[in-house]
Image (cartoon, helix red, strand yellow):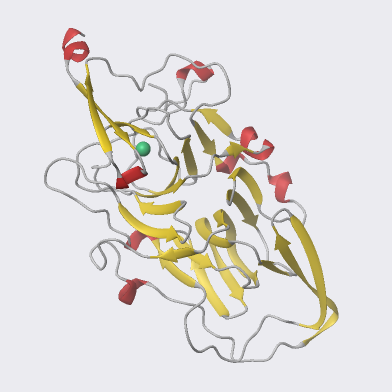
Amino acid sequence: MPDEVLAPNVELFSRNGFAGPNTTIVRAQYRPRFLRARGEYVPRRFHTWDLPAGVFAEPKALPVSILEGEGISFELSRRPAAMSFGYVNVWADELHYIVSGRGELDTEVGTLEVRAGDIVLIPRAVTYRWGEITEEINEYIVVTASELQLDPEGAPGTFNPDLHLDRPVPHGRPGLPVEGEYEVVVRTGDTFTSYFYDVDPIPCLDVVGAPLVLRFNLEHVQGLGVAEGGLAPARLMSSTSGHDFVFGTGSRRSGRPPVHHNADFDEVICYAMGPSPWGSVDTPGTVTWTPKGLLHQGPEEDVQPGYRAFLVETRSTLTMTPAGRDIAHLMETDQYGVHPAEGQTAAAAR
Ligand SMILES: [Fe+2]
């Protein structure tokens, strides 16, 4: 198609993510469509629902990392039933996204009834456990060594904390003596230490002061829209180190993202909920990963009736874990489908 070949394509080369500086390059050829790649440094999409059930068969199974780098990891967890122990990550903050399910998240500062679409921020050193599970919980968890702070750009238009942010309800009762021992698993990076108690250590009578655990539902996060052209998505959170950012990247009125190099950040996007597909991505829990510096475009975001997604940008250089590799597919960087060179007949491939 000569018209397509001759039409100029605008490429954006950005340093420091959306902060810039930016360089615009105009080129005749459209470059995100690579024929194939040889080697390991390639974009991927993770089908998180494909992680075998056996990985979580043990009642004491812990979250499994699929992608990790210095100071950050992306993990999956599945909870069909209540946990019989407490868990506390003392070196890292945790962002829990509930891909599906419904249940009670019990923390040392109270309990939360959690449902699909919820994002729960659990700071380091807060002990928690899953209580009664109404419907199996599937979680995608972003674990950051640097403190993760909610600082929504464009609030209250993009996100209104006064309306949509809440916190656990204190138990208002003592922790009771247990039969035998109650275990709390303390996580320090990749190692674990167990403490044992003769009482349930989690319930609290009351909580005052600054909120510790925060929760909101992604359906209440609105994209920054513009009548014409494109606009960077709205930041939802950032880490105090300046190494990690979280953006709401759901549907919005905006031009399609430009072809771009994000020279300094790996991009990890979780497609959270529909009903609209986002390009070739239509299953909640699909995680796309574009390593830093690789040319990509990504699908149109201006779709109706809409979808919700969020992007984590990190300066860390990420690599797949063995569990991640098991559920990873080579990804094309136009519509974010499974790349045809992978040899699959995925509907996503163009
Ligand atoms: Fe990008």
Instruction: List x then y, in percent, for residue 53.
Output: 69, 45
- Residue 203 lies, in percent from the top left, at 65, 84
Q: Nearer the viewer, residue 203 or 94?
A: 94
The image shows residue 343 at horizontal and vertical percentages of: 53, 16
Left or right of 232 on screen, residue 317: right
Residue 90 seen by the camera: yes
User: Please, is residue 69 above or below residue 177 in the view?
Assistant: above
Of residue 330 and residue 154, the one placed in the foreground of this image is 154
Residue lying at the far right in this picture: please name it.
180
Where residue 60 sits, quadrant-wise, is bottom right
Q: Can you say whether 148 is above or below 349 in the image?
A: below
Left or right? Give the position of 122 relative to 163. right
Name the residue rendered at 49%, 65% in the picture. 120
For the point 40% across and 37% down, the residue is: 281
Asked if 274 appears above or below 288 in the picture, the reply is below
Q: Is residue 9 left or right of residue 174?
A: left
Quarter occupied by residue 332: top left
Seen at 42% across and 31% down, the residue is 293
Q: Quadrant of ligand 1?
A: top left
